[in-house]
């Protein structure tokens, strides 16, 4: 696979090199995939010296963590918009659909997010405590619709079930074997809603969806 074509140095303000490097890494990720990422390649894409990234990231893993964190921020923003567009337990379905659509639209970024999280003992503190994070939105939506916030174990397992359901659908949503269901149900979104509702945790879709 050829390297992404560089368009020359991109100017950045003092103190913004970290941002420039993450942006360059995302461009490479989207055009070449995770295998193309290296600190040297990112430096070249950002138009800086090969040594420059090492002042901000000790290794490729740390750079991938920064990219993953940005992915979670983007996902959180999209899920918040989806939640605001509906009410009640339908919000949980909306969150699940937003998750699936994000994974479909950003496959390389989505993969980095999960590869970066796979071997960590726990999620980053800002994701667990920030009420606007994707993780907290799922938990808080459950609480807002009747889940007992004092039942920590039950709430955590319910959250895991919701994430697993959406993750599984995201992994399989593009299978051609499901095309007839999408046609019969009236499109991709009704298909997502129907699948999520059959998992039991998510509510059934409105009849007019």
Image (cartoon, rainbow, N blue to C red):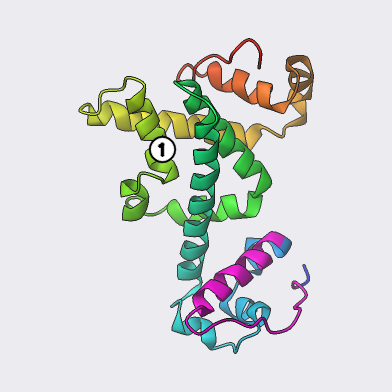
Q: Which residue reaches farthest left?
A: 150
Residue pictured at 28% horizontal, 26% vertical = 154
Residue 199: tell me if it is visible. Answer: yes
Q: Which residue is mark 1?
A: 137
* Image spot of residue 9 (x, y percent): 69, 84
Q: Which residue reaches farthest top?
A: 207
* Image spot of residue 75 (x, y percent): 53, 46
Residue pictured at 54% horizontal, 82% vertical = 13
Q: Judge left or right: residue 184 versus residue 115.
A: right
The residue closer to the viewer here, 72 or 29, is: 72
Whether 46 is among the magenta residues is no
Q: Quadrant of the N terminus?
A: bottom right
Q: Judge left or right: residue 113 versus residue 29.
A: left
Q: Quadrant of the C terminus?
A: top right
Q: Which residues are magenta?
A: 3-30
Tell me the quarter of the picture where residue 167 sits. top right
The local secondary structure at tag 1 comes to helix
Whether 14 is among the magenta residues is yes
Above-or-below relation of 115 to 172: below
């Amino acid at each position: 696979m050829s390297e992404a074509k560089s368009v020359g140095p991109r100017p950045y303000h003092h103190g913004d090199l970290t941002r420039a490097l993450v942006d360059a890494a995302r461009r490479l990720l989207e055009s070449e995939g995770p295998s193309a990422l290296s600190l040297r390649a990112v430096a070249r894409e950002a138009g800086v010296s090969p040594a420059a990234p090492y002042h901000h990231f000790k290794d490729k893993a740390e750079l991938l963590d920064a990219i993953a964190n940005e992915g979670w921020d983007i996902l959180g923003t999209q899920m918040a918009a989806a939640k605001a567009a509906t009410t009640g337990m339908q919000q949980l379905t909306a969150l699940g659909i937003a998750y699936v659509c994000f994974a479909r639209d950003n496959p390389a970024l989505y993969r980095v997010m999960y590869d970066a999280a796979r071997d960590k003992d726990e999620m980053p503190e800002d994701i667990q405590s920030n009420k606007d994070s994707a993780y907290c939105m799922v938990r808080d939506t459950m609480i807002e619709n009747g889940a007992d916030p004092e039942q920590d174990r039950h709430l955590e397992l319910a959250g895991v079930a919701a994430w697993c359901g959406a993750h599984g659908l995201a992994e399989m949503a593009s299978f051609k074997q499901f095309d007839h269901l999408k046609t019969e149900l009236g499109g991709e979104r009704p298909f997502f809603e129907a699948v999520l509702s059959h998992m039991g945790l998510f509510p059934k879709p409105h009849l007019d969806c």
